[in-house]
Image: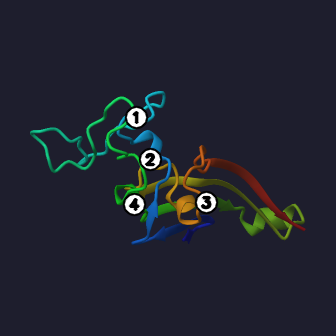
Amino acid sequence: MSYKGVYLTAAFAYSKGAMVYHVAREMFDSDGAYPTYNFMQLQDGWSRWSPENPNATHPQPMYGGNNNAHKASSRYLEDASYLRLRNVTLGYNIPTAITDAWKLSSLSAYIAVDNLFTITDYSGLDPEAALNGNNSSPYPLPRRISLGVNLSF
């Protein structure tokens, strides 16, 4: 979009319906088999088994493990659907009357932000990385803010 020299661009990325096996959950979302690791906080709608809650999404944690419930399981499959605002740029094109006086073809200034937000239910750091086979990365995508000037002679 542009209006009177001001322009705004936005780039989105999305994926819908892909399922990923979240391997890190075998350690952090376990049955107590790895007592030296921190347990992940249960997401909304998840619960631990108890006699009062036999249809829970997660086993009861027991020191040393609960019947190998931490091993490969379909409960570690997650929907990795997401919507990400990959880039948004706001800029201003200097009017031609000014650029002509300065003997320039064009001049503009802008601010750009990368990875402003991601909407997802995936419990890992980056659903896009998980879709590409790296769901155990300790680092999410960085948010970058750039200021710039485009100058043409």
Give the image location of residue 133, x and y in percent: 58, 63
Name the residue tied to disc 1: 39
The quadrant in which the C terminus is found is bottom right
Name the residue tied to disc 2: 25
Q: Depth check: give the residue in front, 121 or 12.
A: 121
Give the image location of residue 103, x and y in percent: 90, 65
Foreground: disc 3 or disc 4: 4
The crowding category of the residue bearing disc 1, from other C-alpha atoms within 10 Å (few below 14, some 14 to 19, many at least 20), is: some
Foreground: disc 3 or disc 1: 1
- 47 is higher (above) or lower (below) than 130: above
Numbered mark located on residue 89 in the image = 3
For marks 2 and 1, the one nearer the N-term is: 2
Is 35 placed left or right of 92 in the picture? left
Q: Secondary structure at mark 2?
A: helix
User: At x 77% / y 66%, what residue is drawn?
Assistant: 97
Q: CA distance from mark 3 to mark 2?
A: 36 Å
Name the residue tied to disc 4: 77
Is 21 placed left or right of 66 in the picture? right
For marks 3 and 2, the one nearer the N-term is: 2
For marks 4 and 2, the one nearer the N-term is: 2
Amino acid bearing label 1: Phe
Amino acid bearing label 3: Thr
Q: CA distance from mark 3 to mark 4?
A: 35 Å
User: At x 57% / y 59%, what residue is drawn?
Assistant: 129
CB atoms of marks 3 and 2 within 8 Å: no
